[in-house]
Amino acid sequence: MNGKQLKNSILQWAIQGKLVPQDPNDEPASVLLEKIRQEKERLIKEKKIKRDKNASIIYRGEDNSYYEKILATGEVKCIDEEIPFEIPQGWKWCRLKHICSMQAGKNISASRIFSDKTELHPYRCVGGNGLRGYTGEFNTQGHYSIVGRQGALCGCVNIEKGKFYATEHAVVVDTYEILSPLFMYYFLMALNLNKYATATAQPGLAVSNVLEVMCPLPPLNEGERIIKKLALLIPLVENYNAIQEKQNALNSSIKERLKKSILQEAIQGKLVPQIAEEGTAQELLEQIKAEKQNLVKEGKLKKSALATSVIFRGDDNRYYEKIGKKCLDITDEIPFDIPENWQWIKLDQGISLLSGRDLEPSQYNDLHHGIPYITGASNFVNSNLIIN
């Protein structure tokens, strides 16, 4: 289980009532919901909020099914299909609109957002995935959860406190006084709001749809215990996730790094021990020279192939290359030291390079008939020839 999966699991335990024990002495969530309804009524009377024409209550019937009653019309409907899991006794199912309000932020031009915080631009500018920069004005003040509402980051949940500017890509979630903003923050993360986004090229969350999402509500005191437990666990999990990501990155690169390291050990003479009885590289060069001379005599090699240079180490411990009568200092070209019985050479002393030639399409096939036709590096994967 990776860090992200572990975090999601912990959040799921939290909203299912499995993270902390229940206390029978806690006031049930039904009491909490009633207090929230009373606060709503007060705010409506003070004309701070409008009455929801579709206000409803959710309850469990004697048949053990869940029902929702629209208060204005008295209409009742079964909502069993919307209930994703069982919750402990004392908890209540509700819709997000029953316990919070949501409002999208306002557009702000990029020219008014600055990367650094200054006296002229002291306020955080918050978008769909947190901080975008700083600005000289604010449109929100308090402690709120922020939900991203557009693009790949829609459904992303952050939390802000103090004075800040919420952009049009951010939804500000306002809880009623009795509920902690941290409670909403953790529970919104657990609800995985991204799955409610519109399936379009530019995914988006409609506030009206999010407010209808079902949310399990614990008793107030248990909610506080859940917050404390999550505040302890989530930083540990996020630290674990960061370490795991570094380990994964290391694991993905270790094979190639190890391969290169082994090859470096090999060409520097550090992979296997030197054995004096095996002779020297100088003796091998003499054998190669003799073989070249034979190939020239047989007409299989041009005489120009014999005109190679000689690289040697002088008494001054510097490397020189002798080409005919010229002798050049090439010490700067020598990348590392090699064993005493090794020899530096130019590639043309040990190998010959030949360019291939292109064939007409009519001269090759992809049916694996005939001799493999190698057209370039694209025919090699992990140093293996791919025949096609």
Image: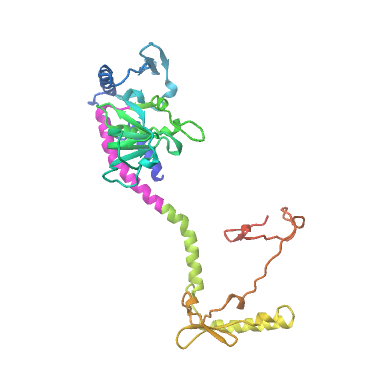
Residue sticking out furthest to the right: 362
Based on the displayed image, in which of its 4 quarters is residue 31 positioned? top left
22 is higher (above) or lower (below) than 289 = above
67 is higher (above) or lower (below) than 127 = above
The picture places residue 366, in percent across and down from the top left corner, at: 71, 53
Residue at the spot 59% in from the left edge and 75% down from the top edge: 347
Based on the displayed image, in which of its 4 quarters is residue 388 positioned? bottom right
Characterize the magenta stretch by its predominant secondary structure: helix
Residue sticking out furthest to the left: 25
The picture places residue 359, in percent across and down from the top left corner, at: 73, 60
Left or right: where 359 falls relative to 131: right
Based on the displayed image, in which of its 4 quarters is residue 69 positioned? top left
107 is higher (above) or lower (below) than 327 = above
The picture places residue 338, in percent across and down from the top left corner, at: 48, 78
In the rendered structure, does residue 219 fall within the stretch colored magenta? yes
Q: Is residue 87 visible?
A: no
What is the span of residues highlighted in magenta in the rendered image?
217-246
